[in-house]
């Protein structure tokens, strides 16, 4: 049995720990925060995420609070008309083998964390911010902010978009600030009028802005996310923001969209960041995973899905007993780089070409997407939701 250190206990880090333990190894998760927690917002999980959760043995735990929405609905956020509608029930489930659902992040995270806690071979350490790593023969030495040195046979950097491990491994600077600002609010369903309780992920597309809403936590809450391309340059993470500012920012949208925005309370704001894809993210016994390796805009709703796929992919490469980590990590990197790089690019493209166009481009979007049959819509999302194809080229 080897010891694998994991920097970061987010969704990617705890999923990786589970994979490491399932492969017969010891995992030590080093989380900088005082607690293992996730944000109180919603997250969409495609069938590829459920496939990964099933393989990690945690699908049932996630199913409990999940809302199995009937459709992904794209609305014109200016005219208020429906553009297109991807049904997520019968044919969708049959095609991909797994459902599409929206969950409370905490529910997803708790299911993963509980599964980790059932393993004696997983140590979950808080207050353990990783500062740097170095090699000592066949070992990796990880220095924590406290000065403590933790030894292991390998290190997985799952420490998110501003990864310390990545900064040392790739030295490629800060993430790209997208210039897009998101406002998020989660509200009790009792404050939502009956006629606005739609069982779908609904996206309202408008020039340089869009609004998404869906029910979460077994339908107890409505998750609202409103995004504007306002050329923001400052990095903001979770700052409370005045409700009037949000109302003003989306005042040009259709009346129904505004009615949803109007329901929001206690808004918080983030400025979205991502990175260009890179092909290599290993350094001998050190590898990156999840957002540390391939941070993306949330427009394809795939960042966490990719982190879960990563965890399964890595687990499947780890044999019990002795492990040639440099080789395994290179293989993992080779298997994952094309697909995750492609999803990073798709996520940006969806924002530009589907969510934010104006004028003639918006009309063209409505006409072309509106003309697609359900089968054609499935074909458009096949690459995201089907079993990953490792050799997929970058777009
Ligand atoms: C607005 C928004 C909506 C989204 N919606 C979706 C969606 O619908 N579907 C989807 O699949 N994805 C979505 N995502 C993306 C998803 O949230 C991320 O891809 C996912 O959370 C990444 O998980 P991670 O574990 O790799 O990184 P993180 O969640 O960032 O976790 C990193 C962890 O590392 C810890 N850490 C950081 N530095 C250190 C250090 N030096 N030492 C120790 N610990 C450290 C952090 O405290 C944190 O716990 C969305 C993202 C955003 C911003």
Image (tube, helix red, strand yellow):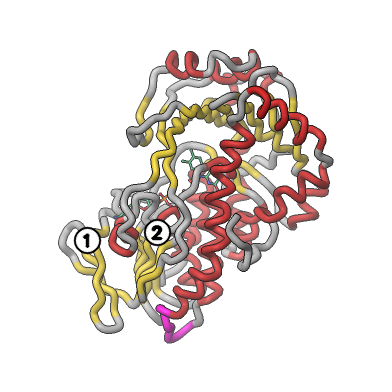
Under 8 Å from ligand 1: the CB of mark 2? yes
Could you tell me how many numbered marks the image carries? 2
Q: Is residue 363 left or right of residue 357?
A: right
Image position of 334 with respect to 97: above or below: below
Q: Is residue 161 left or right of residue 264?
A: left
Look at 42% across and 83% down and name the residue there: 324
Q: Position of residue 304 (x, y in %)?
A: 52, 51
Residue 370 in magenta stretch: no
Q: Is residue 113 visible?
A: no
Residue lying furthest left in this view?
147
Residue lying furthest bottom in this view?
322
Image position of 167 with respect to 377: above or below: below
Quadrant for residue 369, please give it: top right
Task: State the residue in front, 50 or 204.
Answer: 204
Under 8 Å from ligand 1: the CB of mark 1? yes
Q: Is residue 327 visible?
A: yes
Residue carrying label 1: 144
Instruction: Please tell me which of labels 2 and 1 falls first in the chain.
Output: 1
**Image quadrant where one finds the C terminus:** bottom right
Q: Main secondary structure of the magenta part?
A: loop
Dot 2 crowding, Cα within 10 Å, few <14, some 14–19, many 20+: many
Residue carrying label 2: 158
């Amino acid at each position: 049995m080897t010891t694998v250190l994991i920097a970061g206990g987010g969704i990617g880090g705890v999923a990786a720990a589970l994979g490491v333990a399932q492969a017969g190894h010891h995992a030590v998760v080093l989380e900088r925060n005082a607690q293992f927690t996730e944000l109180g917002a919603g997250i969409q999980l495609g069938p590829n995420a459920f496939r990964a959760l099933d393989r990690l043995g945690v699908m049932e735990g996630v199913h409990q609070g999940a809302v199995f929405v009937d459709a992904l609905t794209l609305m014109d956020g200016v005219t208020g008309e429906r553009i297109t509608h991807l049904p997520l029930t019968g044919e969708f489930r049959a095609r991909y083998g797994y459902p599409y659902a929206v969950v409370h992040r905490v529910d997803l995270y708790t299911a993963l964390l509980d599964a980790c806690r059932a393993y004696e071979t997983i140590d979950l350490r808080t207050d353990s911010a990783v500062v740097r790593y170095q090699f000592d023969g066949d070992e990796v030495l990880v220095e924590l902010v406290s000065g403590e040195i933790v030894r292991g046979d390998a290190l997985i950097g799952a420490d998110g978009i501003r990864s310390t491990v990545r900064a040392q491994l790739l030295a490629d600077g800060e993430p790209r600030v997208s210039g897009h600002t998101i406002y998020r609010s989660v509200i009790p369903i009792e404050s939502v009028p009956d006629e606005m309780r739609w069982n779908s992920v609904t996206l309202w597309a408008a020039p340089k802005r869009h609004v998404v809403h869906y029910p979460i936590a077994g339908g107890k809450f409505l998750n609202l996310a409103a995004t504007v391309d306002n050329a923001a340059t400052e990095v903001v993470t979770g700052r409370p923001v005045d409700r009037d500012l949000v109302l003003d920012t989306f005042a040009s949208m259709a009346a129904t969209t505004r009615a949803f925005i109007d329901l929001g309370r206690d808004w918080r704001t983030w400025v979205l960041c991502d990175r260009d894809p890179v092909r290599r993210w290993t350094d001998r016994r050190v590898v990156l995973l999840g957002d540390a390796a391939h941070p993306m805009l949330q427009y394809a709703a795939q960042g966490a899905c990719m982190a879960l796929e990563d965890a399964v992919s890595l687990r499947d490469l780890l044999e019990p007993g002795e492990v040639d980590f440099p080789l395994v990590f290179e293989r993992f990197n080779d298997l994952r780089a094309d697909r995750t790089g492609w999803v990073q690019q798709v996520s940006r493209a969806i924002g530009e070409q589907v969510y934010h166009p104006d004028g003639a481009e918006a009309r063209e979007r409505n006409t072309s997407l509106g003309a697609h049959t359900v089968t054609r819509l499935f074909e458009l999302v096949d690459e995201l939701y089907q079993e990953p194809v490792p050799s997929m080229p970058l777009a």
